[in-house]
Amino acid sequence: MEIKKQWIQEDSDYIRKKVIEYNMSQIDDETKTPLEKVSFVMRNEKGEVVGGVTGEMFWHHLHVDFLWVSEEYRQGGYGAKLIQQVEEYAREKGCHLVKLDTFSFQAPHFYKKLGYKEFGVLKDFPKGQSQHFMEKRL
């Protein structure tokens, strides 16, 4: 048996597929929901993207990948509106949970104000900071 360092996209995709197959074999049929990528985008009057939220829904939950609002639109409540929009969409699709992670230099307090609870912290990642894992039950 040989193990060597390499990156081949085809091999990576195969490994991912096999893990997903195993995971799906462990989940009851009611929980199995197809993966759906979701995003809400905010544009200014010129049509430029100035904010947005992206995520994935599966197994009756939403995982928020990224939330971003351009510097000039921050403090205007747009981040909260984006999160509320994606949460409402997740509710409509039958999701019961939203999960995400954020760094100490990003927005842990922002999410707490929106009702998220912290369930884990990875300290000193990146060095001198921390990564916060959060959830919200819908």
Image: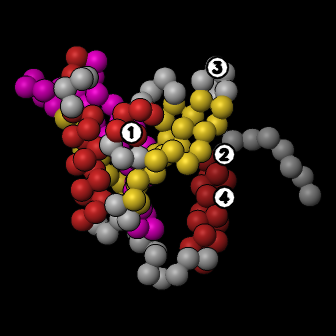
Q: Are marks 4 and 3 in contact (CB under 8 Å)?
A: no
Q: Which residues are magenta?
A: 43-71
Q: Nearer the viewer, mark 2 or mark 1?
A: 1
Residue at 66% x, 31% y: name it: 123
Q: Secondary structure at mark 2?
A: loop
Q: Position of residue 115 (x, y in %)?
A: 36, 47
Residues under labels 1 and 3: Cα distance? Answer: 21 Å
Q: Are marks 2 and 1 in contact (CB under 8 Å)?
A: no
Residues under labels 1 and 4: Cα distance? Answer: 34 Å
Q: Nearer the viewer, residue 1 or 37?
A: 37
Residue farthest along the top direction in this orientation: 72
Residues under labels 2 and 1: Cα distance? Answer: 37 Å
Q: Nearer the viewer, residue 114 or 15?
A: 114
Residue at 66% x, 58% y: name it: 15
Marked residue nearer the N-terminal end (2 or 1): 2
Work out which quarter of the rendered image holds the N terminus and state it: bottom right
Q: Which residue is mark 2?
A: 8
For badge 2, the amino acid type reads Ile
Q: Which residue is mark 4?
A: 15
Residues under labels 4 and 3: Cα distance? Answer: 33 Å
Q: Secondary structure at mark 1?
A: helix
Dominant secondary structure (helix, strand or loop) of the stretch shown in magenta: strand
Residues under labels 2 and 3: Cα distance? Answer: 34 Å
Q: Which residue is mark 1?
A: 111
For badge 3, the amino acid type reads Gly
Based on the picture, tell me whether residue 63 belongs to the magenta stretch: yes
Compared to residue 5, the image places residue 16 above or below, namely below
Q: Which residue is mark 3?
A: 128
Q: Position of residue 27 (x, y in %)?
A: 55, 77
